[in-house]
């Protein structure tokens, strides 16, 4: 959350984010949510916490999680989702 507040100050924009409501669903991709969104710049903001969005350098990618998937599968889903957002003509700002 602090990162989104900092980006709001740095980019001098208003970002829709969970502190103001919840994750934002993009109009062109209603099944996709992002952590923050600025309609003026069409910029999506994503904070990729390692537990939910495994980074490729993190070990134990094939360990099954409590939700039944693996960290490697979560990472691939995240990459796919961010590619969809980019193809829909949004800029994506990622914090890892």
Image (spheres, rainbow, N blue to C red):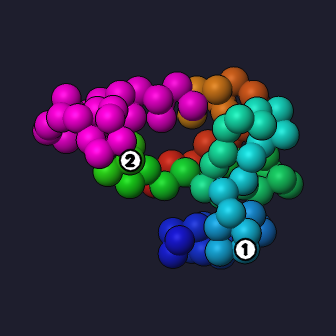
Q: Is residue 84 above or below residue 12?
A: above
Can residue 19 be seen in this snapshot? yes
Q: Is residue 65 above or below residue 38?
A: above
Observer-nearest of 39 and 18: 18
> Residue tagged by mark 1?
20
Q: Would residue 12 be visible to someone looking at this image?
A: no
Q: Residue furthest left?
A: 59
Magenta region: 54-81
Q: Residue at x 52, y 25 (%)?
A: 80
Q: Quadrant of residue 54?
A: top left
Residue that numbered label 2 is attached to: 52
In the image, residue 18 sits, relative to residue 23, either above or below, namely below
**Image quadrant where residue 28 sits:** top right
| Number of numbered discs | 2
Residue at the location (39% across, 34% down)? 74
| Contact flag, marks 2 and 1 (Cβ < 8 Å) | no
Q: Residue at x 66, y 45 (%)?
A: 33
Position in image of residue 82 (x %, y %): 57, 33
Is 50 colored magenta in this rendering? no
Q: Sequence order check: which comes first, mark 2 or mark 1? A: 1
65 in the magenta segment: yes
């Amino acid at each position: 959350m602090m990162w989104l507040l900092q980006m709001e100050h740095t980019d001098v924009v208003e970002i829709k984010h969970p502190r103001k409501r919840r994750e934002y669903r993009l109009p062109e991709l209603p099944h996709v949510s992002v952590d923050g969104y600025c309609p003026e710049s069409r910029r999506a903001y994503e904070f990729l916490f390692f537990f939910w969005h495994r980074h490729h350098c993190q070990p134990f990618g094939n360990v099954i999680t409590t939700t039944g998937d693996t960290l490697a599968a979560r990472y691939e889903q995240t990459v796919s989702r961010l590619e969809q957002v980019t193809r829909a003509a949004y800029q994506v700002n990622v914090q890892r």
